[in-house]
Amino acid sequence: MVDALEFGDVFTEDMGVLNPGRIKFAESMIQFKNEKTGKLNTANAADLDGLNWQRLGNRPGIKIRFSDGKKMRFGGFKDSDLEKIKQFAQKNWNKEVEQNDLVLKGWNYGNCQVDGQSVEFTLDNKPVFEVPLSNVANCVGNKSEATLEFHQNDDCPTSLIEMRFHMPADVEDEESDPVEEFRKAVMAFAGIETETGQPVASLQQILCTTPRGRYDIKVFPNHLSLHGKTYDYKIPIKTIMRLFLVPHKDGRHVYFVISLNPPIRQGQTRYHYLVLEFLKEDEIDLELGLTEQQLNEQYGGKLEKELSGPLYEVVSKIFRVLINMKITVPGNFIGHSGTPAVMCAHRQASGFLYPLEKGFLYIHKPPMYIRFEEVASVHFARSDVSTRSFDFEIELKSGQVLVFNSVEKEEYNKLYDYVQNKHLRIRNAKKMDKNYAEDRFAGSDDEIDPYKETVKAEGKERTGGGSDDDDSDSEDDDYDLDEDIKKRKQNRDSSEGSGSEPDEEFDSDAGSSDSGSGGSETEETPKKKKKKEKEVKEPKEKKERKERAKGEGKKAKREKKDPNAPKRAQSAYFHWLNENRTKIKKEGDTVADVAKRAGEMWKNMDAEAKQPWEKKAAADKDRYEAEMKEYKKSGGGKPASAGGSSSPKKSTGPSPLKAKSKEYISDSDDSDDDDDKPLRPKEKKEKEVKKEESEENSDGSD
C-alpha cells in the first residue's frame, strides 16, 4: 500500500490567481505548499466528506469537500493521475472519487444555491460554475436581483468585481422572497459582518510603522478593520499568511508583523506587511465581544472572556487563536548587541535584520521576509579591514539581489556562523579572524568586476613603466642665499672689468660735484653693499620659487605617450564586449546603458562560457609582453636627457640691479651738502679726468 501520494506542478485558485505548489495525500492528512508564499495548508483526512474529479483552469483537477462545508480545489493534474488518486482514496480514506463533467453550453440560466461555503450554479443537475464564499466581500439584495461583490486581488490580471443573479418571485408562494433568502445564506456562510456588528476585540490608537500612523483596530472573526485619520483598511482574515513577534534592539519595544497576500493598497502603494509597534511596558485589560458558548465551540476554550497583561502578549494571543496560526519568534541567533536584531540599512533606510529559523525578516522600509528556499547564495561584501562595516548581500533564485548595508563589523562572525549552520551557499566562504587581520575575502565563487580588474591592471602597468622615470629624476638642491650673493658679486665685478656690459644710464640733468673725499667713499661702501645685498635677495628668492613651482608642475604633468609603443593587453571582459557590443546595444541606449547591461551579462556568465575569452586575454597579454621587450631593446621608453630642452630658461627680463636707486638721485644740484652724498658714476669719471689733467699741467710747469 502506498503511504503517500505527491504531485508537483499543481495549482490552487485564490481570489482569481492560480498559485503554483505541491500537494501531498497522506493517510491522515492532505497538505498543499504554496511555492510563491511558502505557506503550508493542512487539512485533516478524517473530516473528508467527498472528492470530485472535475476540470479547473482548463486542466484536470480535484475538488475536496469537508464535513464543515469547506471546499478545496486543485488543478494541474494529468488524466493518468485519476486512477492513482482513486485507488489511494479507496484504500486509505474509504472514499470514492466522483467524476463531474462541467456544462459548457454557455447558457446563463439554471439553478443557483448555497452549498456549504460556495455558491453553485447548476444546469440539469450538472455544475456550470461555483464561487467560493471566502472570495465574497458583500451581498446586496434589490427586489428580484441579488448582487455578489468580490474581494480584489492586485496580482490578478483580470478581476471579477461583481456578479448579479436575477431571481424571479415564486407565483404560487407570494410570501417567500428568494432574493432575501439567498442574501442571508450568503452572509451567513461567507462570514460577512457589517461594521455595526460587535467586534471580537477593539484596540485603540495602535502605532503602525507600516503603513505609518496610529489606527483603531477592530478584530472581527473574518476580517480586520483599521481606522486612521486619513485612511481606512479592511483586511480579510484569509489574506493573512504569517505572524511574527520580534524584539526591538533597544529592548523596550516589540514588533508584531502580519504578512498579507494579497497586499493592502494606499493609492499606488502596496503594503505586503502590517507592522505594529508596542512598548513592553504597556498593559491592557480587555473584554472580548464573544459569549462563553462561542469561545468554547468556535475556539475550543483557548481564549478567555477577559484578558489582561502586556499589550503585545494579549494582541498576539488573540491573533494566534482567531487565525489558528503559529507565531514565528526569533530562534537561537543572538547578535553582537545581545539581541536577535542586526542593525543595517536597505536602500539608504535604516532598519533591523532578524535571522530566523527558516528565513530572514527585515523591518522596515520596506518590510520583507526572505525564505531560505528562495535564497540562491549570500555574499559578505566590502568586508576588508579598512572599513568599519560590511554589506550583506542575498541573491535570490529569481536573480534579484538584496543588499543590506552598514552592518557592524562585530556581527560578521556571528552572521557567518548562522549562515553556515543553515547550509546556505556563501560566495566568499572564508571566516574572518577576530582581529580582522584579513584585508579581503577571496573565494572561487567571487564575482569579478570587469571594470575594477581593468583599472587594477592598468595601474600596475603604469607603476612598472614609470619606475625608470622616477629613478632618473634628480633631487632639488637647497637654495643657499649667501653663496648666490657671492657668486653674483663675482660675476658683476668681472663684467665691469671686462667692459662686456654697457654702462648704467642715469639722469643726465644731475649736476656734477667736485667735492668729495676718499674717506667719505669708504664710509659709504658698507651701506651700498648692504642695500645691494637686499636688492639681490628679494628678486632672487622670488625667482627661485617660480622656478621650483615650474619644475614641480612639469613633474606632475603626465608624459606624452609614445605612438610607437605597443598596444596594451585587454582583459577577457573587454575582448567579449568588443565582440558582442552590437548585439548588446539597443536603440536609444547611451554608453552607460550598454556598459551596465554588459556588466550584468558578464557577471551572470558561468566559468565555461568565459573560458574562450580568458584564453584570448592570456594570448593578448603574452603578445604585449613580447612586443614591450622588443620596444625597450630598440631604445623606446627611455627618459629624456638632463641636458635637453627641459632645462629651465634664464629670465630675459631686466636685472633688478639695473634699476635706479634713490641713493643715486639728488634732490637739488645746488645742495650745500653735496660732499656727503655718494657720487654718480659720470661725476666720478669727470672728476678723475680733471684730476689727471691738473697733474699733467703741474708736471709741465715744473
Image (cartoon, rainbow, N blue to C red):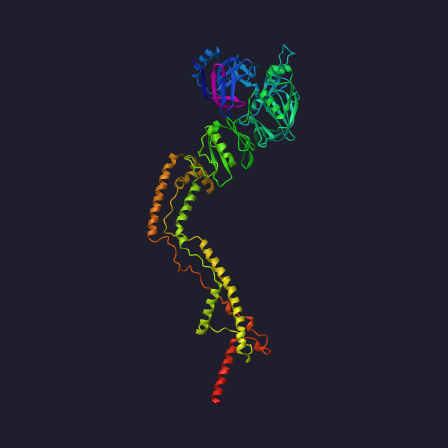
> Percent from the top left, x then y, of residue 695?
49, 85
The magenta segment: 10-29
- How many badges with numbers are in the image? 0
Question: In front: 68, or 541?
Answer: 541
Q: Is residue 395 left or right of residue 146?
A: left
**Residue 22 in magenta?**
yes
The answer to whether residue 571 is above or below residue 163 is below
Classified by dominant secondary structure, the portion drawn in magenta counts as: strand
> Percent from the top left, x then y, of residue 356?
52, 27
Q: Which residue lies furthest to the bottom in this view?
A: 702
Q: Residue at point 34% right, 45% down? A: 623
Q: In this view, does 474 lie to the left or right of 388?
A: left
> Percent from the top left, x then y, of residue 354?
53, 30
Q: In which quarter of the image is the N terminus?
A: top left
Q: Residue at point 46% right, 53% down? A: 556
The answer to whether residue 341 is above or below residue 194 is below
Question: In front: 162, or 580?
Answer: 580
Image quadrant in which you'd find residue 614: top left
**Residue 449 in magenta?**
no
Question: In front: 673, or 327?
Answer: 673
Question: In front: 487, or 272?
Answer: 487
Quick check: can you spot residue 163?
no
> Percent from the top left, x then y, of residue 294?
62, 15
Q: Residue at point 46% right, 36% down? A: 433
Q: Is residue 219 left or right of residue 23?
A: right
Quick check: can you spot residue 529?
yes
Image quadrant in which you'd find residue 342: top right
